[in-house]
Amino acid sequence: MVDQLNTLTTVLSEKLLQIADYQRPYAWEDKQLGDLWDDLDLLGTESHYAGTLVLQRTTEPTRQSSSGEDLGTYEVVDGQQRLTTCLLLLDRVRRALKAYVDTDEGADDAVRDIRKLLTVQIGGVRTRRLQLAGDLGSFWDNIILGEDPMDGVSLSEGQRRLDRARRFFDTRIADLTIDVDDSVKVKRLIDLRTRVNSRLRFLVYEVRSNAEVGVLFETLNERGQPLSELEKVKNYLLYLARQISPQQSDDLAKKINQAWSVIFGNLAGLPVDDDALLNAHWLATKDHRPNEWKRTASIKARFPRHKYVPSADRLTSTGAQSSEADYGKAWQELYDDVSDYVRSLQLCSAFLRDMHTDGAKYHDFTEHDAARARRANAALVRGDVWFPFRPLMFAARLRYPQDGAFYAELVELCETYSARLFAICQFRTNAGRTTLAKAAFDLHSGLDRQEILETIRSCIWNWAPDEAVSSEFVPEKNWYHRRSHKYVLYEYELEINKEIAPFRDFIQTGRRKTTEHVLPQTPEEGSQWLVDFGENHSRLVHGIGNLVLTYDNSSYGRKEYSQKRGSLGTAEPCYLGTSALNRERELGSLYETWTPATVEQRLQQIRAWALQRWAVVPPNDIDAEELDADSEMDDAADEATVLSGQTA
C-alpha cells in the first residue's frame, strides 16, 4: 500500500484511470461543487489538501502513448467524485481559454497543456485519461469533454448531475471574467488552471487487492460526500474479507463487489433511500424488531470481527499458538456467512425493483400468478405506503421463490392492509409494523404460509374492522384534503375502466388530470347550488361522495350541474358527452340532478364498493396480546393521527 501527497498532474502522469461498474454514478450537487470552488478561490498560492484517492492497478498491460509515455491502467476505487469534478472543471477552463489562443500565447500554451492532461494519444486514437463506467462513459467522452450536442438526449441521474456540474462551472467562470479586459481574463483563467492541477493535493493510496480496500474505508473518513449505508456495509464486508486466506479473500471480495454492482443497478431510479433495502432485508432474515435496527452498526454486530479471529490472536492470549485447523475453521465461517448474506441481499434488491416495475417478469411464477403479482404490486405502490410490507415480500420470495400463487395472495392482502388502515382509516404508517415484521421473520424461518396470512388478516381486523372502514364513509368526513383520496377514487375508476391514464398523471404537480368537486367549493352568488345545498354545502363539499377524477377540471369550474352533466354528443367537456372516465359518465347517467340526497346516495355506493374491494374475512382467533404491543407503540404517538405520507 503506497500513500503520498500528489498534485493532480502527478496523479494523472503515466496513468489511464477508470471507474468500475460497481461504483455509484456521479453524485455531486451544487453544495459539493460550491465547496470546491470556494476552496480554489481561497487557497491563493498555497497548496490545499483535496482528499483521498484510492487506486488499484489492473491486470491490463502497460500501454505506450505516441509521445513515448508508459501508461499503466488503474481503477479508481475511491475519490472518483472529486477526481471527475476536477477534470470537468479543467475542461471548462480550457473551453473558456480557447477564445484567446490566437491573441495570447499563454492561453494557447494553457489550452494545449490541459488537453494533454485530459487526453493522451495511443495508437493514433485520442483517449481520455479518465474513463467513466456504464451510461456515463460515452456521455463523458462525447458530450461533457467532447463536442456532441445534447439535443434529444434522455438523461440518467448521473448524466444530469454531470451536465449540471459543467453549467455550474461555466457560470462561475463567467462571473470570474466579467467586466475585465481580455488580458486579465486570461490571467485569471490560467491561475484557476494552476490552482486545480498544481495546488490541490491528493493523498494517494495504491492498493494491491480488492479486500485491502476495506482496510482503508474503515479508517479514512475524508470524502466528497458522506458514504451511504450501503457503501458502508460493503466496505465493512471488504474489510472482513481481508483477514482470511488470500485465495478466499480475493474470491469473497470479488463476490462483494459484483453483488454491489447489481444492487446499485437494481436500486437506480427507485423511490427508496439507501437504508430501505438493508432495513427490510434485516427484518426479514436476521432480527424482526424494528426498533433494534441500527443500520451499519447492526451489520457489524451480526458479523463482528472478533467472531472470525482465532482466540490465540487476541491480546489476551499473547504468545499462544493456533493450529491451522483453528484458522481454517474461522476463515471458512467468515467466508460462508458473508457470502450467504451478500447473495441474499442481492436477491432482495431484485425483488425490490420488481415491486416498483410495472412489467416485472417473475420468471419463476406461472404467467397467471405473475399477472396477479404485478396488479397487486401496482395497487400497493399507488397506495403510497409500501415500506411496512417489504420484509414480508422479501421473505416470501426468499423462502418460496417459485410459489407465485402465495406471493400474489400475500401482496393482495398487504394492499388491503394499506388501503384499510392507511388510506381509509388514516392510521399512522407504523400501525402494526411490529406484527408485520415478526410475520416476515417467521415466514422466512419456515412458519406455515397460511398461518402468516391469517396473522395479517387478524392485524387488519384488529385495526380496521368493517365498522371502522364504514365510519370513514360518512358525509362529514373531509376526504379532499387527504392525500389518499385520489388513490381510492382511482381504484374505484379502475374497477370499470382498465384504460384509465397512469395514476402518476393524477398526482404529479401541474397535470390537468385531477379531482373534480361536483358541488363546487365556491358556488357563484345566486346559483342553483346555493338553493339546493344551502347549509349542507360545507358538510358535503369535500366528502368523497362529491368527488370524482376528471381530465377536465378547469373546464367545469363553478358551472351549474346541468352544464357539467351536459348531454350525449356534446363536444364541450361534460360528464355525459366527452369524458373518457367511466365514473364521470356514470354521474351523468345516474343523476339528473345533484342534491344532498344524491351525494349521500353516491357515498353509500362507494362505501359498499370499498368494503367489497378491500374485503377481509374476520379471523377465527386474534392474538390480542401480540397486537396490543403494536397498539401501545402507536398510541404513544397518537393512535389515529392523520396519515402524514410515505416514509422510506
Image: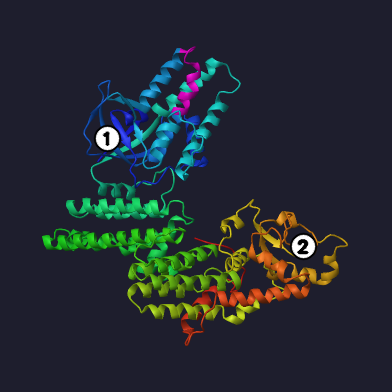
Q: Report the mark closest to the observer, 2 or 1.
A: 2
| Segment tinted magenta in the rendering | 91-104
As drawn, 249 above or below 147: below
Please say whether residue 252 is visible from this viewpoint. Answer: yes
Q: Position of residue 125 (x, y in %)?
A: 31, 26
Question: Which residue reaches farthest bottom?
Answer: 620
Mark 1 surroundings within 10 Å by alpha-carbon count, few (fewer than 14), some (14 through 19), many (20 or more): many
Q: Amino acid at mark 1?
A: Thr
Please give left or right for residue 585 compared with residue 254 in the image.
right
As drawn, 64 above or below 74: above
Q: Position of residue 634 (x, y in %)?
A: 54, 73
Please tell me which residue is depicted at 78% across the width and 72% down the height of the picture: 595
For marks 2 and 1, the one nearer the N-term is: 1
Query: Is 46 contained in the magenta span?
Result: no
Mark 2 surroundings within 10 Å by alpha-carbon count, few (fewer than 14), some (14 through 19), many (20 or more): many
Q: Quadrant of the N terminus?
A: top left
Q: Position of residue 431 (x, y in %)?
A: 53, 72
As drawn, 389 above or below 356: below
Query: Is 102 contained in the magenta span?
Result: yes
Q: Position of residue 530 (x, y in %)?
A: 84, 66
Q: Which SS class for mark 2?
A: loop
Q: List the residue tagged with mark 1.
A: 73
Q: Amino acid at mark 2?
A: Pro
Please tell me which residue is depicted at 44% across the width and 60% down the height of the picture: 276
Foreground residue among 304 and 290: 290
Q: List the residue tagged with mark 2.
A: 520
Foreground residue among 278 and 615: 615
Corner quadrant of residue 522: bottom right
